Amino acid sequence: MIIVDELPFSFVEKEGFKNFMRVTMPQFHIPSLIRAWIWQIALLIVCLNRVWIMCLLLQLIMLVLMMLLERNV
């Protein structure tokens, strides 16, 4: 709901959302804004690591292709 509707993370700290969650799912504990930011930063780091790995793989592939092309010339 928060992400799909592009609501700010502070939305979960409002009393209306807290009451809604208490009624619909009492065992759910709403994370603090700081914890939500920490999760976002961790997700960003994971994504950046994946991009970095893909860049390294592409560089390796390009290097191998260049070596193969030099042999055939």
Image (cartoon, rainbow, N blue to C red):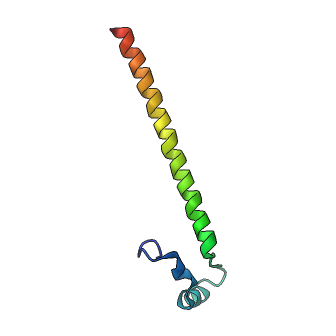
Q: Quadrant of residue 29?
A: bottom right
Coordinates of residue 13 in the picture (x, y in percent)? 57, 83
Coordinates of residue 61 in the picture (x, y in percent)? 44, 27
For image coordinates 42% across by 72% down, the residue present is 4
Hey, which residue is sitting farthest left in the picture? 73
How many marks are shown on the rendered structure? 0
Q: Could you tell whether 54 is left or right of 41 in the image?
A: left
- Residue 19 lies, with reference to residue 10, above or below; the image says below
Q: Could you tell whether 1 is left or right of 73 in the image?
A: right
Coordinates of residue 39 in the picture (x, y in percent)? 59, 64
Q: Quadrant of residue 6?
A: bottom left
For image coordinates 36% across by 15% down, the residue present is 69
For image coordinates 61% across by 64% down, the residue present is 38
Coordinates of residue 20 in the picture (x, y in percent)? 55, 88
Q: Could you tell whether 41 is left or right of 67 in the image?
A: right
- Residue 9 lies, with reference to residue 48, above or below; the image says below
For image coordinates 55% across by 63% down, the residue present is 40
Placement of the C terminus among the 4 image quadrants: top left
- Residue 5 lies, with reference to residue 66, above or below; the image says below
